[in-house]
Amino acid sequence: MVSINYAFREISCKIVYYGPGLSGKTTNLQYVHGRMPAKSRGDLISLATEADRTLYFDFLPIHVGDIGGFATKFQLYTVPGQVFYNATRKLVLRGVDGIVFVADSQAAKMDENIESLANMYENLRENEIDSDQIPLVFQYNKRDLPDVVSLDELEKTLNPSGRPCTEACAVDGLGVFDTMKRITKLVLEDTKRRTSAASPTPAGPSAPPVVAAALAGGSTSESATAVAAAKSAIASRHGWEEKEGASVSVALSDAPVTSGPFPRRDIVASDGPAAASAPASGASPIVMAQQRSTRVRHRHRSIWDRLFGWLSGR
């Protein structure tokens, strides 16, 4: 799922290149890494075996600038193509936002393409990802080699649902950026669709009356009446009495709170008069009720008595 950090205003999207072994997944990332400006890309992390096969994954963070005031980043991964690394494939697919299936166009590799595609759908299901909803682009790689399957046959066999596809020769860079542009566009459109559908209404039936009145755009007098009613309800619930000059603040929005001079606090005991000190200039006193608790004080004395007794060896 797309990660949106509102504090730092960043959007991170995860794209995974999937496909059989030696189909050109790592070559895609290597070409992108080599052609991207240094300020727009991170390091290419590649873990490979002695046979130059990706053992775990390649990771390439790409910074594409600001979109709607958010710094947008795409993190590109690949999975190992070998069947016996299926646990790693499944792990890399967690939290995926878009997939590029890199198929080998050679006729001799069609069985491997079919097997890898079936494995991808199975791993998506086990990760509880809807394969019909996830953005997916097919890249038919190695189109420059002899004995390649026709595009129509590849589409019929691997992509009967008609997902977007590109022809490519990753070694020469043909179709590499076209593929990346297609998948990033699909991911951003899907993110926009899902965030719009998940956006809550500003004030629902459960919103407090004062908040609902403010968000509904009522008149100033209506809002003031609602605030007064809210204050009265809170005061009666807690048994507070109105005190002249006291003030209560009610937040009606998510606007940032600015702090000013701290108001004076008058601690009013339940059986004593209010403090006689004058309020600070420009600040209204906050009246707080203080209830004495004999039970708590007795408990505290008991604890101290036992502590002092232990220290004195009694």
Image (cartoon, helix red, strand yellow):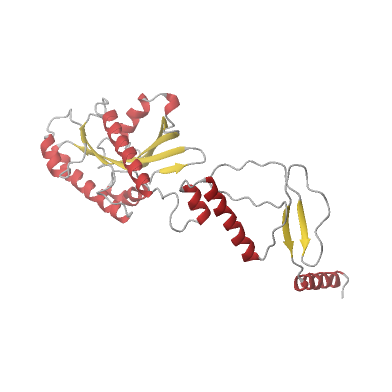
Q: Residue at x 52, y 50 (%)?
A: 222
Which residue is outermost to the right?
A: 312
Q: Is residue 78 visible?
A: no
Q: Residue at x 59, y 62 (%)?
A: 233
Q: Where does the image place residue 310, in percent across and percent down from the top left?
A: 83, 72
**Where's the C terminus, which quadrant?**
bottom right
Residue 3 position by quadrant: top left
Q: Where does the image place residue 181, in percent across and percent down from the top left?
A: 30, 31
- Which residue is more in the foreground, 255 or 106? 255
Reply above or below: 226 against 49. Answer: below
Left or right: residue 249 versus residue 23 is right
Counting the numbered discs, the total is: 0
Left or right: residue 126 versus residue 114 is right
Q: Where does the image place residue 164, in percent across and percent down from the top left?
A: 21, 37
Reply above or below: 181 against 17. Answer: above
Left or right: residue 273 versus residue 236 is right
Q: Residue at x 43, y 58 (%)?
A: 205
Q: Is residue 215 visible?
A: yes
Which residue is outermost to the bottom?
A: 314
Residue 39 position by quadrant: top left
Q: Where does the image place residue 156, in percent across and percent down from the top left?
A: 12, 42
- Which residue is more in the foreground, 6 or 146? 6
Left or right: residue 4 versus residue 234 is left
Residue 150 position by quadrant: top left
